[in-house]
Amino acid sequence: MQTPTTYSGLIGLFIDFINILIPAMFALVFAYLVWKIIDSWVIRAGDPTKVAEGRVYAVTAVLVLVVAVSFWGIVAIVRSSFLGL
C-alpha cells in the first residue's frame, strides 16, 4: 500500500478502508441476527418473553443492515460523483 500524496488519494484510501469495514459489519450483524433468532425462537420457543425479546433483536438487526447498506451506497455515490474514483 502506498502512502497517499494528494487529497484525492487520502480520501480514496479512507473509502477503501470503509469498503473493507462495511462487509465485515454486514457479517457481524447477520451472525448476530441468526444467533438471536435461533436463541429466541428455536431454543427458547416456549418462553413468551424470550420470543418477544427475539423479535426486538430481529427488528433492530434488520434496521442496522438497512442503515449499513444505505451508508455503503452513499459512500459509493460520493466516491464516483465527487472524486471520480
Image (spheres, grey):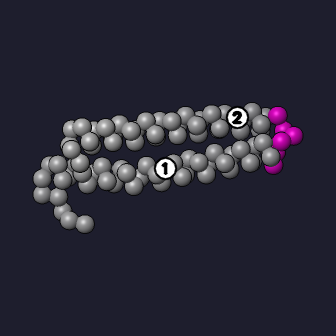
* Residue furthest to the left: 6
| Quadrant where the N terminus is found in the figure | bottom left
Give the residue displayed 17% in from the left and 48% down from the top: 8
Q: Residue at x 55, y 51 (%)?
A: 28
Give the mark nearer the N terminus: 2 vs 1.
1
Residue 10, horizontal then vertical, whole percent:
20, 52
63 shown above or below 6:
above
Q: Residues within 10 Å of mark 1 (few under 14, many from 20)?
A: some
For the stretch drawn in magenta, the main secondary structure is loop
Instruction: Give the camera-side residue of 37 and 50.
Output: 37
Q: How many marks?
A: 2
Q: Is residue 47 magenta?
A: yes
Question: How far, Cα to Cα, is label 2 from label 1?
Answer: 21 Å
Residue 7 at x, y percent in the picture:
14, 49
**Magenta-span inclusion, residue 68:** no
Q: Which residue, given by chain and number where applicable, does mark 1 sit on?
A: 25
Q: Residue at x 69, y 46 (%)?
A: 36
Classify 6 as above or below 81: below
Residue 4 to residue 72: above or below: below
Range covered by the magenta-colored residues: 43-48
Mark 2, other Cα within 10 Å: few <14 / some 14–19 / many ≥20: some
Identify the secondary structure beneath mark 1.
helix
| Amino acid tagged 2 | Arg
Q: Quadrant of residue 84?
A: top left
Mark 1 residue type: Met
Q: Give how far across and how far down residue 6 sits, in percent.
A: 12, 53
In the image, is 77 to the left or to the right of 61?
A: left
Q: Which mark is residue 55?
A: 2
Determine which quarter of the picture holds residue 47: top right
As helix, strand or loop, the secondary structure at mark 2 comes to helix
